[in-house]
Amino acid sequence: MNLIFSQSFKNVWILTISSALAGSLIPVMLLAGSLIGTELAPNAKLATAPLALMILGTAASVVPISACMRSLGRKISLWLFMAVGIATCGLAVAALQLQSFTLFCLASLILGSCNGAILQTRFAAMESVPAEQGAAAASMVMAGGIIAAFVGPELAVIGLHLTGVDYQGSFILGAGCVALAMLVLALYRPATTAVEPSVHSQTPALRILANPSFCLALASGSAAYIIMSFVMTGTPISMHHVYGHNLIDTKWVIQSHIAAMFLPSFIAPLLFKLISIRGMMLLGLACYSATILVGISDTSVNGFWLQLVLLGVGWNFLFVAGTSLLPNTHVHRDRFKAQALNDFTIFSLQAIAALSAGWVINLVSWQQILLGCLVPMAAMLTVLVWEKIKSPQLRGATD
């Protein structure tokens, strides 16, 4: 506890609060995006397209964001992409005014770049503290997402009828939150120089991928996002349109899910010490297994609530574990390349999961959707076992 209140964690606190405020815009899209898509899309199968495009925008922007942060520094780059987020809210407002599904999808795509930059704050936080405190710093930034978990959906509902067009006000309020985040970020003092032309990575991406531990970090983050996105994206449609639960209950479930994604970060540093990074990954897979079991047996509001809470906890354990393992899988000069490779892969796969959710939910039952999550879980477990076998061999070969 004394650690997080130490002077060395000042930057981490600033990044936590700033990213939480800016990140509130993402739950606005998570709650409202598929519901807006249902109203505007020419085909019901495209209802989740705005969410999928936001995630695709995140994936597509990862490499440019990493290059921007390498050349301009973390702070200026974060400001730049937060400004893009504010402008994108204006585009979403215009799209709703015109009732244009195409324009709304474009806004969602661009919003993904803002999300991609916000997600980089976890690396900035880890760079602001000694290496042994990196996991705690990453966990703290993730814990800040609790603010976004409650503020974002509230903004979506409060702004629903703020203007004459549904949900316009939601994006106006979201833009205000991002502007506030930019003001908080002014207090951030980067730990390293902004420009590092002499240390650009020359290591081929395939060599980074050849490290079993890097593959495990990548697999953990990928499984976390694929399953979470696939289930969470389909939840508003399944709850509100398939099972007839009202919007307030749907909002409560989404809020609880997002809170559950970040609340475990408060105890994550302790869990790392007790059960290790790989133990956290197994615990995350166990939570996902429980999600499937609950979802198959109960489609009431309480059933959706429990499965989405378990989904959020499982995501946290897998994603934070993967993030904490990542810096140990490459040398320091390769960090931007490794981070870009990691995030690009994760969010590309997440985009596929989100887009397919809208298509799949029109073809199969909710229970069958949940059973489909067993595939990425099995793949993740396979990589975990492979890394455990290969890593000691590689260490022995280099001794």
Image (spheres, helix red, strand yellow):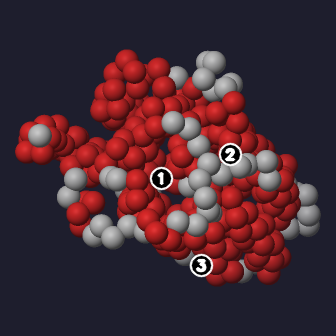
- How many residues crowd mark 2 within 10 Å: few (<14), some (14–19), many (20+)? many
Q: CA distance from mark 1 to mark 3?
A: 23 Å
Q: What residue is shown with label 3?
A: 42
- 27, 121: nearer the viewer: 121
Eye-nearest disc, 3 or 2: 2
**Quarter of the image that includes the N terminus:** top right
Q: Is residue 326 visible?
A: yes
Q: Is residue 302 visible?
A: no
As drawn, 152 above or below 166: above
Q: Which dot marks residue 15?
A: 2
Residue shown at the point (68%, 41%) measured from the top left:
11
Where is residue 258, by image quadrant?
Answer: top right
As drawn, 302 above or below 248: above
Indicate the position of residue 309 as horizontal and vertical percent values: 53, 33
Q: What residue is shown with label 1?
A: 229
Q: CA distance from mark 3 to mark 2?
A: 40 Å
- 316, 272: nearer the viewer: 272
